[in-house]
Image: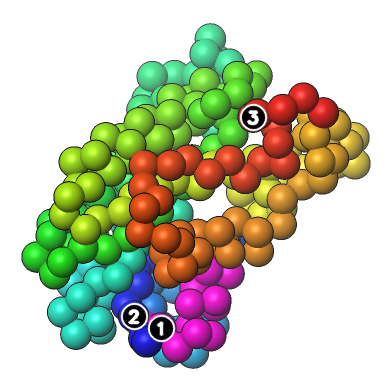
Amino acid sequence: MSKSFLIVGASSDIALELGQRLLSKGHSVTLLARDAHRVQPLVDQGAQLIQGDALDKEVVQSAVDAAKENGEGSLAGVAHLVGSLVLRPPHALTLDAFNEVIHTNLSSAFLTLSIACKTMLRSGGGRLVFTSSVAATLGLMNHEAIAAAKGGVESMVRSAASTYSQRGIRLNVVAPGLTDTRLAETLLRSDAMREAAVGKIPLKRINEKQEIASTIEWLLDGAPDNITGQTFHLDGGMSQISG
């Protein structure tokens, strides 16, 4: 059965993979992205684009409304894949730069959560998936800003999962480790850096974007109804076991 899904932050590598997977199964997909060029291949396949900033309340509302309309009054699921990465120690990070990381990662997640849940309450429920990072669980050098932001996302989603548990809304988080995407290019720009990064991962390899996208797709469209408030650590064991 065809369902309607919204991807917020749709121009990321993982989002593009997720959109492709949902479209290939015949679902309606609405994309909220700033970079129209990056998502054009999905638009060519029938996805609807709402261009704008995920921190703009009116833009997010328009995207949610469009996805609901595509679903004939029902929004089945939302994936929030907005992210940024600033790696500096606290003594070299300004308050403005810190706040920008919080705003981009956490405030945009709250805005999506707030608007999407209001719509889902009216239509009988739905599923939301947010993205965190291994840095929210494992202390990593120079990751203070992103750790604070993503730790906030995880805590917020756990609370929201409780708030909406009796209203048919299921909320979960995926927390990837280092993944081979544009966002990670600065961490993988040399063979030595790549080797050092892989050495910290028990499975001794970097995530593929398909692995993250397939987990998000499952949480949106295949996972049992009793899964909510969970953080899925997609990090090759890095946050949980020694390698």
Q: Which segment did they paint magenta?
A: 15-28
Q: Classify residue 74 as left or right of residue 18.
A: left
**Mark number for residue 239?**
3
Residue 16 magenta-highlighted: yes
**Which amino acid does the dot numbered 3 rest on?**
Ser
Q: Residue at x 33, y 66 (%)?
A: 77
**Which amino acid does the dot numbered 1 rest on?**
His
* Secondary structure mainly formed by the magenta segment: helix
How many neighbours does mark 1 have within 10 angstroms: few (below 14), some (14-19), or many (20 or more)? some
| Cβ atoms at labels 2 and 1 below 8 Å apart | yes
- Percent coordinates x, y for residue 169 in the rendering: 25, 56
Q: Classify residue 220 as left or right of residue 118.
A: right
Q: CA distance from mark 2 to mark 1?
A: 5 Å
Query: Callout 1: helix, strand or loop?
Result: loop
Q: Quadrant of residue 17?
A: bottom right
Q: CA distance from mark 2 to mark 3?
A: 34 Å
For the question of whether residue 189 can be seen, the reply is no
Q: Residue at x 82, y 45 (%)?
A: 205
**Which amino acid does the dot numbered 2 rest on?**
Lys
Q: Residue at x 55, y 59 (%)?
A: 215
- Percent coordinates x, y for residue 3 in the rendering: 34, 80
Query: Callout 2: helix, strand or loop?
Result: loop
Q: Tell me the residue that label 1 is attached to.
A: 27
